[in-house]
């Protein structure tokens, strides 16, 4: 089955065909580096890392060009710099470094390009100039604005009608705008804020413009895939699309627009005001990176994901089972194998990771049951091939079990205990007695007693 991706623009799943298979191009809107990234920010980094891995396997690593930018010009960065009494580069470099470390701990591969806004100021100014020349932008009171009425396709990506947008005008209305829906390409900088010299005075680019210019600079005028979180469809991607298309004779910016769903925390929106923001680097103190990654991949990337403690506990338990299998097979030399066809079919179906993980579970059961050396070698080879695509099993199994992170406390909730008991039942069915005993030990440490009855295993708190 060929790779199919759901494209927000055409609102359908479509076979993926790159314009040029010798250079498949993908851009992901990266972080604004003013503070620590939270686990919601990790979702696009991780799910599109899986896509990057699939593309590299299909077209060859040298034939995929993946860019994830760093937004290092932004009001929030200015505010953080002022508060700390430092320059914006100090803040941006600090948090860009932490972001790289956090994502690396989640086994996210380094993108091929990591452009920064400050590194492409010349291109941004040139892009604004072109848009003025083509009649798509105008200057007013030191600002340069994009005239949304100049582009017939405005609203097509987010499925909005310009006249509704104007009537609703939730966007900021400023005196210098011809139309309330016009958006800023360039704006003046206050004297004590960072700014760059431009034909329109000292100022700075708008956020949307930054991405359009960086895409053109590192990937070209037209790309295969443009990705980001769902919240970016409007206005960010709608505006990127308008700017890029108008400056490139109406040529399409991206052939596939991909958007991940949002991650909520215990069914509530993660927000600073609710005080429930979970930072990646804090979670990493408590859990191995692969557990966080597994949990992020446990839902389909377009679906909402409810981040709970029980989700993490289940992810840890499941990974323990797989690492247990790999540990038992540590003396078996893995056969050279590709990921099984049913696993690939799931991934190719718009990156259906929950289904792909279900195939991995079946494979682990087969690996546990395998008795012949060649069966074991093949099953191990297939598990590792899956691991390569999903970014799992990068730890040595022995080291994995030595970690003191995760399940360390004795406060497991019932769902997590159920998951552990189910994993033990599975291990017994697989005749993986070592693993079954290990889980019993983990449970008994938590004062959970299991009784194995004919109709199944039940548990109670001791
Ligand atoms: P930001 O640094 O806020 O620009 O966000 C970086 C990326 O994370 C963007 O692609 C956002 O769409 C995405 N993002 C932010 N919050 C969440 C969330 N709670 N769930 C999923 N994605 C998110
Ligand atoms: Zn962007």
Image: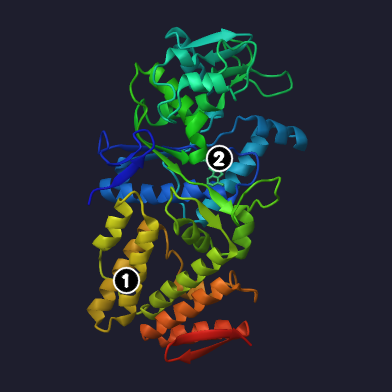
- Nearer the observer, 146 or 273: 273
- Residue 268 seen anywhere in this rendered image of the structure: yes
Q: Nearer the viewer, mark 2 or mark 1?
A: 1
For mark 2, does the 10 Å Cα neighbourhood hold few (<14), some (14 to 19), or many (20 or more) residues? many
Q: How many marks?
A: 2
Q: Which residue is mark 1?
A: 363
Looking at the image, residue 110 sits to the left or right of residue 180; the answer is: left
Mark 2 vs 1: CB contact within 8 A: no
User: Residue 261 got which mark?
Assistant: none
For this view, does 215 lie left or right of residue 462? left
Ligand 1 is within 8 Å of the C-beta of the residue at disc 1: no
Q: Is residue 314 above or below residue 15?
A: below
In the rendering, at what x and y percent does residue 262 appear?
52, 47
The residue at the point 71 percent across, 36 percent down is 80
Q: Position of residue 122 (x, y in %)?
A: 51, 20
**Viewer-closest of 390 and 145:** 145
Ligand 1 lies under 8 Å from the Cβ of mark 2: yes
- The x, y position of residue 197, in whole percent, is 60, 15
Residue placed at 60% from the left, 29% from the top?
73
Identify the mark nearer the N-term, 2 or 1. Answer: 2
SS category of the residue bearing label 2: loop
In the picture, the quarter occupied by the C terminus is bottom right
Rendered residue at 55%/76% (across/down)? 417
Give me the disc on residue 31: 2
Indicate the position of residue 276 as horizontal and vertical percent values: 67, 52
Question: Is residue 101 something one can see in this rendering?
Answer: no
Q: Is residue 164 above or below residue 428?
A: above
């Amino acid at each position: 089955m060929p790779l199919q991706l759901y494209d927000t623009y055409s609102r359908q799943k479509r076979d993926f065909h790159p314009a040029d298979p010798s250079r498949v191009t993908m851009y992901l809107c990266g972080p604004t580096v003013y503070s620590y990234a939270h686990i919601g920010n990790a979702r696009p980094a991780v799910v599109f890392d899986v896509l990057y891995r699939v593309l590299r396997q299909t077209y060859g690593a040298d034939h995929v060009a993946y860019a994830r930018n760093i937004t290092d010009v932004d009001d929030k960065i200015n505010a953080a710099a002022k508060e700390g009494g430092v320059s914006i580069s100090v803040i941006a470099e600090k948090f860009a470094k932490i972001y790289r470390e956090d994502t690396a701990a989640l086994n996210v591969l380094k993108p091929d390009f990591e452009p920064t806004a400050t590194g492409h100021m010349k291109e941004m100014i040139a892009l604004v100039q072109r848009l003025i020349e083509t009649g798509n932008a105008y200057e007013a009171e030191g600002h340069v604005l994009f005239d949304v009425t100049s582009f017939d396709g405005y609203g097509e990506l987010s499925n909005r009608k310009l006249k509704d947008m104007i009537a609703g005008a939730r966007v900021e209305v400023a005196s210098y705008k011809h139309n309330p829906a016009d958006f800023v390409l360039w704006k003046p900088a206050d004297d004590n804020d960072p700014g760059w010299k431009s034909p329109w005075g000292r100022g700075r680019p708008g956020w949307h413009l930054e991405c359009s210019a960086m895409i053109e600079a590192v990937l070209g005028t037209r790309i295969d895939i443009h990705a980001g979180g769902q919240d970016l469809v409007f206005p960010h991607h709608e505006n990127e699309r308008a700017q890029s298309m108008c400056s490139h004779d109406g040529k399409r910016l991206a052939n596939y627009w991909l958007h991940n769903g949002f991650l909520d925390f215990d069914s509530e929106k993660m927000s600073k005001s609710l005080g429930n923001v979970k930072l990646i680097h804090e979670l990493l103190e408590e859990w191995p990176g692969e557990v966080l990654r597994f949990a992020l991949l446990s839902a389909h990337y377009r679906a909402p994901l409810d981040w709970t403690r029980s989700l993490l506990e289940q992810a840890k338990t499941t990974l323990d089972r797989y690492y247990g299998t790999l540990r038992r097979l540590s003396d078996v030399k893995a056969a050279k194998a590709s990921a099984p066809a049913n696993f690939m079919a799931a991934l190719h179906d718009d990156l259906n990771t929950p289904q792909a993980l279900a195939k991995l579970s079946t494979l682990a059961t087969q690996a546990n049951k395998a008795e012949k050396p060649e069966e074991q070698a093949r099953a191990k080879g297939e598990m590792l091939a899956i691991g390569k695509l999903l970014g799992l099993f990068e730890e040595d199994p022995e080291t994995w079990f030595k970690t003191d992170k995760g399940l360390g406390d004795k406060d497991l909730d019932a769902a997590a205990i159920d998951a552990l008991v189910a994993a033990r039942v599975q291990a017994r069915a697989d005749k993986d007695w070592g693993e079954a005993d290990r889980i019993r030990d983990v449970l008994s440490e938590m004062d959970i007693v299991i009784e194995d009855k004919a109709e199944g295993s039940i548990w109670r708190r001791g």
